[in-house]
Amino acid sequence: MGDLATASKAVETDARALGLALRLYETAVAAVARGSASILRAAALELRGPRRLGAFGAVTGQRASETMLSWDCARGATGYAVQVNVKPNDPAAWSKPVAGNRLAYRLVKGPYPGAEFLARVAALGRDGAMAEWSDPVLVSAC
């Protein structure tokens, strides 16, 4: 048993050292690349950023005109931007994105009680990069 415990401890130590070395390598390459995808690919690093969100849901709020949006956390996201369209038949009527949401939910207000409107969410990365918008969801205000 002693040899197995020693070997297990050695593997754990090596894994920690490898993780540290990889983070140092990624940091150095990122500093040189300054966002250049070709340099990152040449260094065999995956381009990382927030992933596009899948479907999300909405529940009517407790007060007039409110709706609570919620979604699954996106890998690599440090925050989320939310956008609404109170004219579902007008694809150009999206509001200015509201960013800064660090949690995977947001309370939004419709234009009036019972209103139906579209909502969508996008994940934000550490560098401020925004993933693609989720598919719009038709929601109803309370």
Image (cartoon, grey):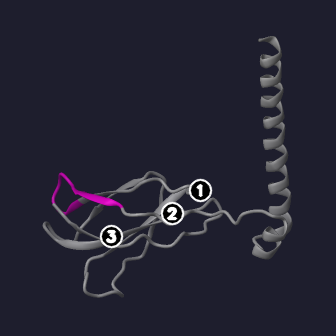
> Which span is picked out in magenta?
56-66
What is the crowding at mark 2: few (fewer than 14 residues within 10 Å), some, or many (at least 20)? many
Q: On the picture, is 86 further left or further right than 104?
A: left
Q: Amino acid at mark 3?
A: Ala
What is the crowding at mark 3: few (fewer than 14 residues within 10 Å), some, or many (at least 20)? many
Q: Give how far apart the Cα atoms at labels 2 and 3 are.
A: 14 Å
Q: On the picture, is 121 further left or further right than 41?
A: left
Q: Quadrant of residue 76?
A: bottom right
Query: Mark 3 or 1, which is nearer the eye?
Result: 1
What is the crowding at mark 1: few (fewer than 14 residues within 10 Å), some, or many (at least 20)? some
Q: Which mark is residue 119?
A: 3
**Magenta stretch holds residue 103:** no
Residue 107, position in %: x, y? Answer: 31, 57
Name the residue rendered at 85%, 45% in the picture. Answer: 21
Name the residue rendered at 30%, 62% in the picture. Answer: 108
- What residue did someone put label 2 on? 123
Q: Nearer the viewer, residue 14 or 38?
A: 14
Residue 36, position in %: x, y? Answer: 78, 74
Residue 59, position in %: x, y? Answer: 23, 56
Question: Do callouts 2 and 1 mark residues in contact (Cβ within 8 Å)?
Answer: yes
Name the residue rendered at 55%, 55% in the picture. Answer: 75
Q: Earlier in the sequence, mark 2 or mark 1?
A: 1
Q: Give how far apart the Cα atoms at labels 3 and 1 are.
A: 22 Å
Residue 85, position in %: x, y? Answer: 31, 77
Q: Nearer the viewer, residue 45 or 118?
A: 45
- Determine the secondary structure under disc 2: strand
- What residue did someone put label 1 on? 76
Name the residue rendered at 13%, 67% in the picture. Answer: 114
Q: Amino acid at mark 2?
A: Ala
The C terminus sits in image quarter: bottom left
